[in-house]
Image (cartoon, rainbow, N blue to C red):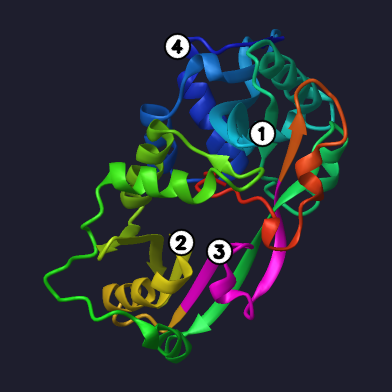
């Protein structure tokens, strides 16, 4: 039986998440305290034990299309308890999510497969590969070289100068005219920032001379992972310089970038990242044919 979760199910959902994904209790609890919405969650309940054994969450997202932002949904944390798998339960949840999205007038469903093999799995339900990223690995000396064109920003200008509202407007303005790109609302952005910082990450931001840029960074064992960096090409060296200053001891850097980012176009590899489908079942999805620097971008996806 598929239902919206009751308050009494919350601890079971947290346990299900931990069993399926292995995330820390702190990470899971933070999501349920700050981003979980019962009416945007579908659970499959085994009526014989009256407990949820599978679930998925639906997060609101806008998809840029034909100069507008189309209301859509992002399917997140879809999972089934191991002893209930291969019984068609997740198929029922996905199909219910698509029907629910259609009833709510949400045109698309988007998801990030947790493993490469799952691209084929989601393809059974109308999802098509759409979103790709450029993955770039760099040593510190290489990044120093790329930052040589940085503007001479006074030390008094701190990397925290951009306000969250400025980050939101800048990100929206940078992406809204790019077909198929994912636009998160203020609530989603606030959670992305707070959860990133809660997990020990740092948002490097810079505002100077009318230019803006930001990067979601986290460091582990001398390697800095940049999971989103949005900046205009001419300002990229300046933001990179700020990242280097923020992590003076880091030796390696890993960037996950939009394919359209021409500053890094000679580096790294392009990989599949996320899929999309129309909730009304119609095909083909036109934005899946976009390629090259027109490839749609899905960032801050809580993958």
**Sequence order check, earlier mark of 2 and 3:** 2
Disc number for residue 256: 3
- What residue is pinned by disc 2? 229
Magenta stretch: residue 271 in it?
Answer: yes
**Sequence order check, earlier mark of 4 and 1:** 4
Disc number for residue 7: 4
**Sequence order check, earlier mark of 1 and 2:** 1
Q: Residue at x 29, y 81 (%)?
A: 248
User: Does the rendering let one see residue 29?
Assistant: no
Magenta stretch: residue 234 in it?
Answer: no
Quick check: 36 above or below 145? above
Q: Residue at x 77, y 33 (%)?
A: 277
In percent of width and height, residue 242 lies at 30, 73
Q: CA distance from mark 3 to mark 1?
A: 25 Å
Q: Count residues near mark 1 (Cα–Cα under 10 Å), then give few for <14, some for 14-19, many for 20+.
A: many
Q: Which residues are magenta?
A: 253-274
| Pointers 4 and 1 in contact (C-beta within 8 Å) | no
In percent of width and height, residue 125 lies at 84, 31
Q: Nearer the viewer, mark 3 or mark 1?
A: 3
Looking at the rendered structure, the secondary structure element under dot 4 is: helix
- What residue is pinned by disc 1? 79
| Pointers 3 and 4 in contact (C-beta within 8 Å) | no
Quick check: 271 above or below 195? below
In percent of width and height, residue 69 lies at 57, 32
* Front residue of 227 and 257: 257
């Amino acid at each position: 039986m598929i239902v919206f979760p009751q308050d009494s199910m919350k601890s079971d959902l947290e346990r299900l998440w931990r069993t399926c994904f292995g995330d820390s209790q702190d990470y899971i609890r933070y999501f349920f305290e700050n981003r979980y919405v019962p009416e945007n969650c579908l659970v499959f309940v085994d009526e014989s034990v009256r407990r949820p054994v599978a679930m998925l969450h639906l997060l609101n997202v806008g998809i840029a299309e034909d100069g507008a932002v189309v209301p859509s949904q992002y399917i997140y944390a879809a999972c089934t308890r191991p002893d209930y798998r291969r019984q068609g339960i997740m198929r029922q949840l996905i199909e219910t999510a698509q029907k629910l999205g259609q009833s709510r007038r949400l045109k698309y469903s988007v998801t990030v497969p947790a493993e490469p093999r799952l691209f084929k799995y989601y393809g059974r339900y109308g999802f098509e590969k759409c979103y790709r990223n450029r993955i770039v690995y760099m040593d510190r000396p290489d990044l120093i070289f790329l930052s040589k064109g940085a503007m001479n920003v006074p030390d008094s200008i701190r990397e925290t100068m951009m306000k969250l509202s400025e980050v939101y407007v800048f990100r929206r303005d940078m992406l809204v005219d790019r077909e198929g790109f994912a636009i998160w609302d203020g609530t989603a952005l606030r959670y992305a920032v707070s959860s990133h910082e809660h997990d020990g990450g740092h948002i490097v931001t810079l505002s100077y001379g009318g230019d803006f840029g930001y990067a979601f960074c986290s460091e582990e064992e001398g390697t800095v992972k940049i999971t989103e960096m949005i900046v205009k090409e001419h300002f990229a060296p300046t933001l990179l310089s700020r990242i280097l200053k923020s992590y003076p001891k880091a030796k390696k850097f890993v960037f996950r970038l939009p394919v359209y980012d021409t500053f890094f176009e000679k580096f790294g590899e392009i990989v599949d990242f996320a899929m999309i489908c129309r909730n009304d079942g119609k095909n083909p999805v036109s934005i899946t044919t976009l390629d090259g620097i027109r490839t749609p971008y899905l960032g801050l996806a809580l993958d």
